[in-house]
Amino acid sequence: MADAHKKEVDHISGVETTGHEWDGLKELNNPLPKWWLYIFYATIVWAIGYWVVYPSWPLISGYTQGVIGDSQRANALAAYEEGMAERAEIGGALIDASLDEIKSTPELLEFAMANGRAAFGDNCAACHGSGALGFEGYPNLQDDKWIWGGTLDDIHTTLKYGIRSGHDEARFGDMPSFGADGLLSDEEITQVANYVGQQAGLEPEAGVDLAAGQEVYEINCAACHGDDLKGMREVGAPDLTANNYLYGKSIEAIKAQVHNARNGVMPAWAPRLEPATVKSLAVYVHSFGGGE
């Protein structure tokens, strides 16, 4: 029995083996390096000291407070409250200041831009894109074509009340569905779509009577879009000679819009966001460069 428990010594290194062997490889029972052991012991001492000094041990209804009573959670909450108080102070200044004063006051402008950028990402980017370039049916906020106006006040009003949002003060413009409602025939829609397309720089379809299209336009469309097709902001009628169309710039897209108008909806943000945030959004969107 004594021989069975006798440890084997490696004949090359002279170190005892542990008795473990894998595919002829035997594990040597070398001691751990002294430096590693000292560091390990130091970490144990450090951990014990940390448990004593800082809050650490969970209890039934709380935790040990530690000798110094420090709490990262309490520190974080204090920092949060401090930040919220500072935010409320600057936010109050935003509410009291006019949009032009915000643009001309560096401290207010810095806060409005940061606040507006965050609010845009949370509330507007889903429709207008993170870069505000828009998609089909959602306006590009970086160009200079604003259906309802691109001044700071115009943008602020649009943000507050929305477009066809149901709010009492909402921007509202309603284009009829000339085909779906039986106001124009298919031939008349083809004629007016080609006339408008030609005026906007598109190649009209062959064989279409453009003079008849102009007559249809003057009777049914000019009251809102103007005789020169430049649109009217008062009723939210877009410029039909612009380079970009909200629902696509082609003869077929114009036909589709005349036949069955798509009147998009933008929410009213005043009931959803704080007044300071709405002002911040107006300043941020205006900064894209397409504003007036």
Image (spheres, rainbow, N blue to C red):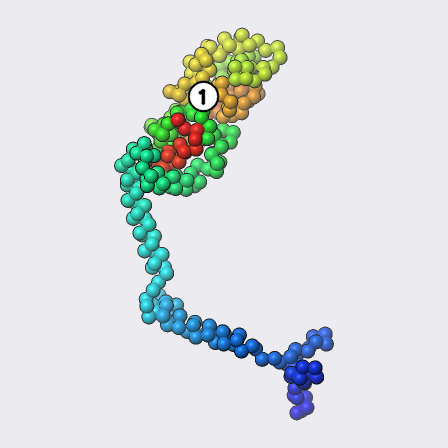
- Pick whichever, 290 or 165, lies toward us: 290
Residue at 46%, 74% in the rendered image: 42
Please give the name of the residue rendered at 53% of the width and 11% of the height, measured from the top-left corner. Answer: 213
Query: 240 or 286: nearer the eye?
Result: 286
Q: Is residue 200 above or below residue 137?
A: above
Residue 12 position, x and y percent, is 70, 82
Q: Where is residue 227 in the image (x, y as percent from the top left)?
A: 45, 12
Residue located at (61% from left, 80% from top): 30
Q: Looking at the picture, does residue 14 appear above or below residue 285?
A: below
Q: Decide: is 8 above or below 267.
A: below
Q: Name the residue under label 1.
A: 238
For residue 150, which quarter of the picture? top left
Residue count near mark 1 (Cα–Cα under 10 Å), binned few <14, some 14–19, many ≥20:
many
The C terminus - image quarter = top left
The amino acid sitting under disc 1 is Pro
- Left or right of 39 on screen, residue 287: left
